[in-house]
Image (tube, rainbow, N blue to C red):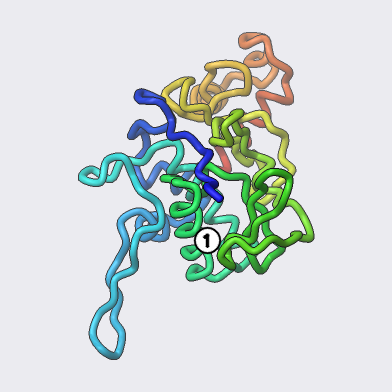
Amino acid sequence: MNRNARKYPKVGDPRCAPAYTIAEVSRYVGIPCATVRSWVVGRAYPVKSGRHYFQPVTIPPDKKFRQLSFLNLVEIYVLGAIRREHRIPLPGVRKAIGYLREQFGSRHPLAEQKIETDGRDLFIRWLNSLINISREGQLAMPEFLDAHLKRIEWDTSGLASRLYLLTRRQDLYSPKVVVIDPRISFGRPVLKGTGIATAVIADRYKGGETIRELAHDYDRDPLDIEEAIRCELVLDAA
């Protein structure tokens, strides 16, 4: 059966444009810069027989200058969840990504499919069934839905369109107040539903303005302003 029903983004889609440095992606998703660099450009490592090369996991739009797109950002966020929270070995992840690229024609599989996990294997939903992509497409049923993916919004074609950042460290149920949307503010973190950059809010707060003053100025609930500031503090501490 031909499962290649996913469409590539249209030419000019901001989700595909080079917009972030490796350091910025590292900061936004809370993954060490060296790890992100390895996933993007690969690295050589010594073995008994000589040296092996760790192949990149995601494909950047600008390999020369190593600028990453929003889709790269989402893939790295998802990959971090798979590796850090669920401890799924990287070879299994590579196998799953390879399967998706081959069977679905996906250039950015981790940003193009709704992936679920039971802590051992990876799954995608396809025609109301669950396909185990760690085991060459075997149908299976996971035990739970990965909470990380609930912070991603998907368009009708199944492609990631927004990512809600954690405003509280390691709290997957942080309020969805701060969002990265590649169509707004050049893909920088903003308050949901606005183009107000959280970095600007945090800078004004650090400059002495109160949360109440900022809430009045931006016509937002003070709790939203608090979450924006808290998010920037989390990013600064990353």
Q: Characterize the local packing of mark 1: few (<14), some (14-19) or many (20 or more) Cα atoms within 10 angstroms.
A: many
Question: Residue at (48%, 20%) from the top-left corner?
Answer: 184
Q: Which residue, as the protein is rendered here, is positioned at the far left?
A: 64
Picture coordinates of residue 47, whole percent (x, y): 31, 85
Question: Residue at (25%, 79%) from the top-left corner?
Answer: 51
Left or right, residue 59 beside residue 117: left
In the displayed structure, 186 sits above or below 122; it is: above
The amino acid beneath tag 1 is Ala
Picture coordinates of residue 216, whole percent (x, y): 67, 10
Left or right, residue 55 beside residue 84: left
Quadrant of res 35: bottom left
Question: Residue at (73%, 18%) from the top-left corner?
Answer: 221
In the displayed structure, 64 sits above or below 153; it is: below
Q: Which residue is mark 1?
A: 96
In the displayed structure, 160 sits above or below 124; it is: above
Where disc 1 sits, the SS reads helix
Picture coordinates of residue 153, whole percent (x, y): 62, 33
Closest to the observer: 32 or 15?
Answer: 15
Q: Which residue, as the protein is rendered here, is positioned at the far right?
A: 143
Left or right, residue 58 beside residue 109: left
Question: Residue at (40%, 57%) from the top-left corner?
Answer: 57
Closest to the observer: 213 or 183?
Answer: 183
Report the label total.
1
Closest to the observer: 31 or 206?
Answer: 31
Quadrant of res 102: bottom left
